[in-house]
Image: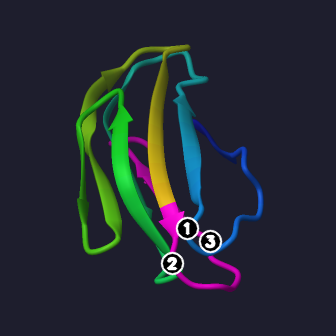
């Protein structure tokens, strides 16, 4: 699996919104199963909206997307997370992607 995360806005000010785009690509020649995407936000950023290849939910600053049952070879899963800055500082999200073959 190849994972990319892009934040197009770059640095933002307190009160401003930003969007994270996440792409998970199966670069292999066989399908993978139970592909899970979890993003943990620091206290300086609050996730406000999620959408993507599978449903997602926000609980206490953690965005969890329902695992994709199967991702075929060359298939791409795309996700979007909107967030707002609520305090100054260097705020980076932690992204975890796992599957039955990629842990």
Q: Single out the residue that lies furthest toward the front.
A: 15
Mark 1 lies on a secondary structure that is loop
Q: Is residue 73 left or right of residue 13?
A: left
Dot 2 and dot 3 residues touching (CB under 8 Å): no
How far from the left and from the top, in percent, is residue 18?
Answer: 59, 53
Q: Is residue 61 left or right of residue 93?
A: left
Of badges 2 and 1, nearer the viewer stands 2
Dot 3 and dot 1 residues touching (CB under 8 Å): yes
The residue segment tinted magenta is 84-103
| Residue at mark 2 | 86
- Callout 2 crowding tier (Cα within 10 Å): few <14, some 14–19, many ≥20: some
Does residue 91 show up magenta in the picture?
yes
Mark 2 lies on a secondary structure that is loop
Name the residue rendered at 77%, 56% in the picture: 10
Compare residues 55 and 83 and report the one nearer the observer.
83
Of badges 2 and 3, nearer the viewer stands 2
| Residue at mark 3 | 92
How far from the left and from the top, in percent, is residue 50?
Answer: 35, 44
| Residue at mark 1 | 93
How far from the left and from the top, in percent, is residue 93?
Answer: 55, 67
As drawn, 84 above or below 26: below
Compare residues 64 and 17 and report the one nearer the observer.
17
Can residue 93 be seen at all in this image of the molecule? Answer: yes
């Amino acid at each position: 699996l190849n994972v990319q995360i892009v934040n197009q806005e770059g640095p933002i000010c307190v009160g401003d919104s930003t969007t994270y785009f996440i792409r998970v690509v199966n670069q292999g020649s066989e399908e993978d199963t139970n592909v899970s995407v979890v993003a943990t936000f620091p206290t300086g950023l609050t996730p406000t909206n999620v959408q993507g290849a599978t449903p997602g939910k926000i609980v206490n600053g953690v965005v969890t997307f329902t695992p994709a049952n199967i991702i075929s070879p060359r298939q791409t899963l795309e996700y979007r997370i909107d967030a707002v800055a609520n305090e100054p500082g260097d705020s980076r999200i932690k992204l975890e992607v796992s599957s039955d073959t990629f842990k």
